[in-house]
Image: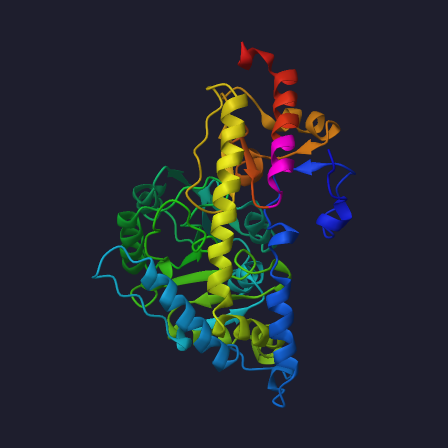
Amino acid sequence: MGIPPAEALLPQIHLAPDMIHLGIGQPSPSLLPIKEIKTAAAHCLGQEEVSFLAYGEARGNHTFRQSLANFLTAQYQQNRQSDQDQYGVGPDQLLITNGVSQALDLICTLFSKPGDTVLVEEPSYFLALKIFADHHLNLVSIPVDENGLLTAVLEEKLEILSPAFLYTIPSYQNPSGVTLFRKRREELARISAKKNLLVVADEVYHFLNYTDTPPPPLGVFADQCPMIALGSFSKILAPGLRLGWIHTSSALVKKIAHSGLLQSGGGFNPFTSEIVNGIIQEGRLTAHIKHLRQVYINRAALLCRELRAALPDTISFQTPQGGYFVWLKFPHDIDTNAFRKIAQKQKVDFYPGSFFSPSQGLSSHMRLCFALYENAILIEGVRRLVAVIKQVHPELFE
C-alpha cells in the first residue's frame, strides 16, 4: 500500500522508506491546523503594535497569559464532575514556556542538583527520563495501577527518601494510558503539603479525553501544596509551535521568573504566543480540540479493534479513554526488545516497554500510538506487527 515518504511525514525523524512506526507519539500532518495558524499569523503581523518581537516579559506576555487563563478556566469548568468544583486559573499563576521538555529542564535546573533523587512513575515518559539523566539525577520509581500512581507506596518511600521532586503524568498517562483517580489526586495533594514534596505534573493529555470526564487537573491544587502543572500546545494545536505553560502558585511563578535564563533572555516565545493568542481569542483552539477528540476516538477504536481481532487473549490491553497510546502487555517471559529488529526489517516499528522503565524493566510491554497515521496505515501497521509476533512467538497463537 502507499505509505507517505518518511521525510514528508516526519522531517525530524529518519525512517526507512515504507516504514510504519507505530510507536511515535505526535499528530498527523493532516491534523495540524495550518489555516488557523496562517490567519492568526497574518493578523499578528498586520498590527502596528510589535512588542511581540521584543524580548518580552519573563512570565510571558500578560495579554496572552490572560487569554490562556480564561481558556483553562473554561475547559476545567466544562469538565467539572460536580457543582462544588470551581476551578479558576489566573494569569499570575501562569508562566509561558517553550513546551514541556524545556519546562522540565528548567525545573531540574532550579529545583535539583546532580545526585538528587527524583521520584518517577513506573512506567513513565521515556524522554523525561532522558532529561533527568542529563541532570545526573537518581531516579526512584513508584508503581502505578489501573487508577494511577500508588500514593500509599509514595508515602512509604517518603519515610526514607527526601526527593527533589516527584514527576507524574496524571491524565491518560504516557505510556500506560491510566488516569490518576480523583481520590488519589486529593491524597497526593495532602502528601505534598504534609511532606513539602514538590510535585511536577505533566498534563499534556488532559484535554484529550474520549470516553469520560477527567478528574480535576493537579494544577488546581497549586495554592494548597508545592505543585507545578505543565501544559503544552504540542498535543492540542501543533508541536512545531514549541509553546507551553507552567501552572503553579504565584509565589513559584515569581521564583521561576527570576531564573538567570529568563532574566537574560526574556520571556519564552513571545512571537508564537501572539499567534496562539489570536487562535484562542477567536475560539479556534476549543473547536480544534473538539475535532481532535473525534478523530482520535475513531482511530483508537480502529486500532484496538484490529489488535483484538488478530492477537490472542494472552496479549492484553485496554481501550484508551484519552491520550495517544495503547499499552500492550505480553506474557512475562516475552521480551519485546528481542524481536524489534525483526519487526524493523518487516517495515514496522514500535517502542518496547523497557524504554519507559527507569530500571530497564517492563520488557514484556509495548507502546503503540494511534495519533500519527490515518486509518488505512494503522490497519496495515497492525497486519505487519502481528505477522512479526506470529513469526517470533507462534506458540502464542496455538
Left or right placement of residue 59 versus residue 49 in this view: left
The part of the image, by quadrant, that contains residue 342 is top right
Q: Inspect the magenta stretch and tell me whether residue 374 lies in it.
A: yes
At x 55%, y 36%, the residue is 367
Left or right placement of residue 5 versus residue 358 in this view: right
| Residue 338 in the image, given as x and y percentages of width and height | 64, 25
| Residue 64 in the image, given as x and y percentages of width and height | 50, 77
Left or right placement of residue 350 versus residue 257 in this view: right
Q: Front-most of 379 and 204?
A: 379
Up-down relation of residue 368 to residue 386 (above or below): below
Q: Main secondary structure of the magenta part?
A: helix
At x 48%, y 58%, the residue is 289
> What is the quadrant of the N terminus in the image?
top right
The residue at the far left in this view is: 84
The part of the image, by quadrant, that contains residue 46 is bottom right
Residue span colored magenta = 372-381
